[in-house]
Amino acid sequence: MQQRATQGREARLAKAAGPVPGAVGGVVLLLPAGEETSTRRPSPVDRAALRPLARRLTRAGRDAGLVTHVVQYRCRGWNETQADLARDARWAADEVVRRYGDVPICLAGLDMGGRAALHAGGHEAVNSVLALAPWLPEDDVAAPLEPVKQLAGRRVLIVHGTDDRRTDPELSFRLAGRAKKANRDVCRFEVHSDGHGLAQHRFEVASLAVDFVLGTLFGRPFSRPLRDALAAPPPLGLRMPLAAGFGRTL
């Protein structure tokens, strides 16, 4: 029934956020939020929530040839083992390679899009993953754990508000801990007193995203907090506080 409901629909890349440079040096694919189970069309509100970050990234990386696209899914649901949003994220990475050639890709997702980014991070063209307040399933001894081995060789940044009431920050901490065992280039920042949308500290979160993306895609030096978080052993590098005002003096 779910497969029939999405027949004829195709994932697509929204128009690039800003003009496409003559020489594309790297691409960020922004993966919107979604739902646990649904075959409804993706929400335009969820896509719109990522456009400010897309524009911020595009401005910051224009000189390096950065292109940013929001991904439009075939449907808004993860849908159990079908993992539709992760499937669409992998398609989007393939489409980037088709359009732009052999360029590095960062998958950046919010909520259920964060889960999709983590799952699809093993795509051969992906060199980094940014998961913002990722939706993750509750730990269940009867169900397999979320995969992390596909993240080996990628740099991974997870950002989560400590007051998130929609997605449990403790679950992203546990996943980060397992991922760190398979890949040392994993870190996680906590945004104290912020909720699911990370709206209270949106400037700091966007600044951290820019820092991470420009460093992973183009080799620019990371800020001191990001360097420290990547280098620190667990749990320090997985509970790094995002300081108020981060990015205003970078």
Image: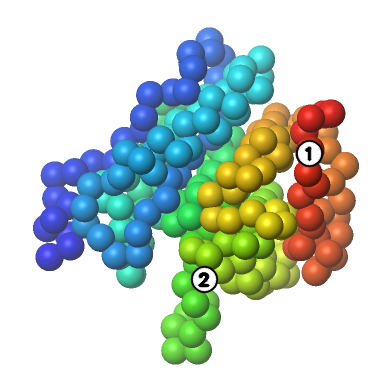
**Residue 205 sits above or below residue 64 on the image:** below
Residue 86's image quarter? bottom left
Is residue 106 at all visible to an observer of this figure? yes
Residue furthest bottom in the image: 142
User: In front here: 142 or 43?
Assistant: 43
Residue 197 place in picture, x, y as percent: 53, 49
State which mark lies toward you, 1 or 2. 1
Q: Is residue 143 above or below residue 137?
A: below
| Residue at the image point whose x is 49% and y is 63% from the top | 166
Task: Please indicate, yes or no, whether residue 230 appears anywhere in the rendered image.
Answer: no
Residue under label 1:
246
Q: Nearer the viewer, residue 244 or 95?
A: 244
For residue 218, above or below residue 191: above
Is 49 placed above or below 136 here?
above
Residue 163 picture location, percent across and down:
62, 62
Whether residue 99 sits left or right of residue 153 in the image: it is: left
